Image: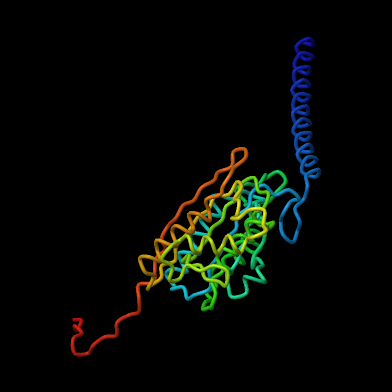
Amino acid sequence: MLGSFFKDKSAKDKAAIDKLSYMGLFLLGVLSVFAVQAGKEKPDPATNCFRKIDGKIAVVLDKTDFIPKQTQDEIVKRAWDSIIKNAQAGDLISVYEITQKSLFDLKPVFSMCLPKMGKDSNELVENSRVLDVKFKESFEKPLLDVLSKNTGQAQNSPIAEAITDINLSDAMRDAEQGRILLFSDLMQHSSNVSTYQCKNAEVPIAQFRKSRQGSVEPRPLFKNVYVELHLIPRLGITELESKCRATFWNWFFGNMETTGQAKRGISMLDLPGAYGTAIPNDPNTATKQP
């Protein structure tokens, strides 16, 4: 009997010790996670960026002419969808507007690194709900507000100059993977180069080369960059202008190279809208609705 008692007590003590050991290992694991988190670099509170930024996306909006509402709505959707699909937490997201002032005062109207979302959180040390609220308030809302602005009407459309400057700036330079989203009718028009009334693409190409005289590259070098062209439809563009436009931009974006696993290339999609003005109802021919 006495031997059985000590045997049962020994088994219970062993179970208790095992339980404490497991708890100790769990707590040690939790403390290790906290220690790792505490040692990690914290992002800049104003921009949410780390010192080293691997991925960069620049959204470029051509605001030099009126944009129909259905076109503007699709621009917002495509830009947002591309950012969510292609950007990782910590990637730099910049938005530029091409306007009358772009030739001499081109600045991003939005520049922030993509914050971490709740679905990517570590629940041991982070609150997914808090992360999602912060994501919406500090990133999603101000970005969508900027993308939704609809301004227009300018004498110049310095698209090529803007893309060149953005590609050379911190918004795209030195990215391990860069992406440019250009929303424009691609009708270049500035004192340097123009595709309006163009009959031969060699003319605007020569004009651009001349404007870049003295530069290291006669046309931009897109390194580790993928370009999305979203074409805003415009009325009144002639067939010759359309062909000239296509040839010029194929040349402009034709200088690409990659390192590592980066993706490069160009895709082009039409945007909806710009089908002309509505024909007013003629009371003599209008069909009455039942």
Q: Vertical placement of 105 versus 288: above or below?
A: above
Quadrant of the drawing holding the N terminus: top right
The one nearer the camera, 213 or 24, is: 213
In the displayed orientation, state which residue is furthest to the bottom.
Answer: 284
How many discs mark residues in the rendered view? 0
Q: Nearer the viewer, residue 286 or 184?
A: 184
Q: Is residue 103 left or right of residue 188?
A: right
Residue 118 percent across, percent down from the top left: 62, 51
Is residue 265 rendered to the left or right of residue 289?
right
The colour scheme applied to this rendered structure is rainbow
Q: Position of residue 11 (x, y in %)?
A: 75, 18
**Closest to the observer: 4 or 103?**
103
User: How far across and down, in percent of the image, does residue 64 sit?
Assistant: 53, 74
Q: Quadrant of the C terminus?
A: bottom left
* Left or right side of 262 for 198: left
Pick the front one: 168 or 190: 190
Using the rendered view, name the quadrant where residue 111 is placed.
Answer: bottom right
> Does residue 91 sit above or below 9 in this rendering?
below
The spot of residue 259 in percent (x, y) is 62, 40
Based on the displayed image, in which of its 4 quarters is residue 241 positioned?
Answer: bottom left
The residue under the point 72% across, 46% down is: 125
Give the quadrant of residue 26: top right
